[in-house]
Image (cartoon, helix red, strand yellow):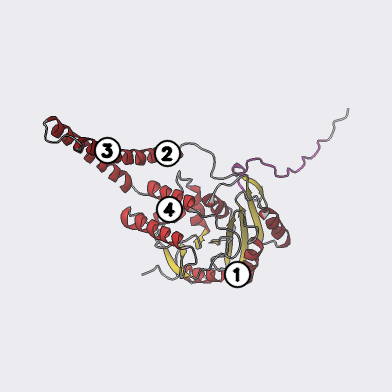
Amino acid sequence: MGPSVDRTRISSITVVVPCYNEVDNITASYEEIVEELGDLDLEVIYVDDGSADGSLDIIRGLTEQDPRVGFISFTRNFGFEAAFSAGYRYAAQPWVLHIDADQQFPAAEARVLIDEAQQGYDAVFGVRTNRQDPLLRRWGTAVFHHLAQRVLRVEIPRGATAFRLVRTDLARRVVDLELGTPYFMATVPRLTSRYTTVAVGHRARERGESKVGFRFLASHAVELFVGFTRRLPGVAAGLALGTAALCGLLAVAAGTGVIGGAAVPAALFVVLAVLTAVLAVGVRYLVTVGAGQPRPRQFYIRETSLHDRVDPADLLLDERPVAPQPRRAEVTS
């Protein structure tokens, strides 16, 4: 059973559109968003994640022609999590709608998220129906969710995607935690139980190339597995203790002549393999601990149209115009 119904109609939304080298999709994504959601009190924030293909020029043009559009442009490519985090942090409306620039999620499907959120939820995540992605990527996602939820018992909304509608206060709270291994979908359940998923349509990418490859998915999975569960180090510790016991038994067996010949080297290689796996897990956790130490911010902004709300700490170079100071009257004798 969901939360009590919230009769307040959701009518004010900030649409956050992260983009990295999406020059062929930006104009089309803007036109679709405005066409489908233009009846709402709308703000659209494009977050340029260090594009090098002219994406920023098009975004600037949209900002000049439509006052509802704003943008944030990074000093370099900081990655997907940083891109949408910047949009969430500086959203002005009470709800944030996340739509990627590739248009694989139709903007019209946002109505499904809105209808569900009005039942009293703080966050609603879209789940793809008839997913239009390569088979290998679909299989990888399925394995990822199985490991996360069934094996490691990380609480994330089942099948959730980045296509989501979230209360801005909640989204900003997640971003401002500044976790060493940030992972939005796994952090929301730690802050509220009022979240849900809903089926939404999905379509194939028509223009440009996907930036989500195996390396991105693997890195994202490791951050989740290491940062949001203690089962993995528990398993590693158990393996280490079991291997230590096995080594002791092998030493006794070899010393008393119970085993010998090729059996001893084979057993030693097995022990070495297990210890190497344990070491790998331990090193990854040390990396996570190190990530929690003082470090650069998640992103730095080079250019933005949102000068009135951007924290100066997020600017690498504060080049905002400074109002001229009034001249002091000269004192004459």
Image quadrant in which the N terminus is located: bottom left
Location of residue 55 with respect to 256 vertically, above or below: below
Q: Circle 2 sits on which residue?
A: 287
Q: Circle 1 sits on which residue?
A: 37
Q: Circle 4 sits on which residue?
A: 187
Q: Is 66 within the magenta?
A: no
Which mark's residue is nearer the viewer, 1 or 3?
3
Label 2, secondary structure: give it.
Answer: helix
Location of residue 135 with respect to 285 vertically, above or below: below
Q: Circle 3 sits on which residue?
A: 269
Image quadrant in which the C terminus is located: top right
Sort mark 3 into few (<14), some (14-19) or many (20+) by Cα contacts within 10 Å. Answer: few
Counting from the top left corner in percent of width and height, residue 316 is at 63, 41
Magenta span of residues: 310-328
Q: Quadrant of residue 204?
A: bottom right
Q: CA distance from mark 1 to mark 4?
A: 28 Å
Three-letter code for the amino acid on which mark 2 is drawn: Val
Which mark's residue is nearer the viewer, 2 or 1?
2
Counting from the top left corner in percent of width and height, residue 165 is at 51, 63
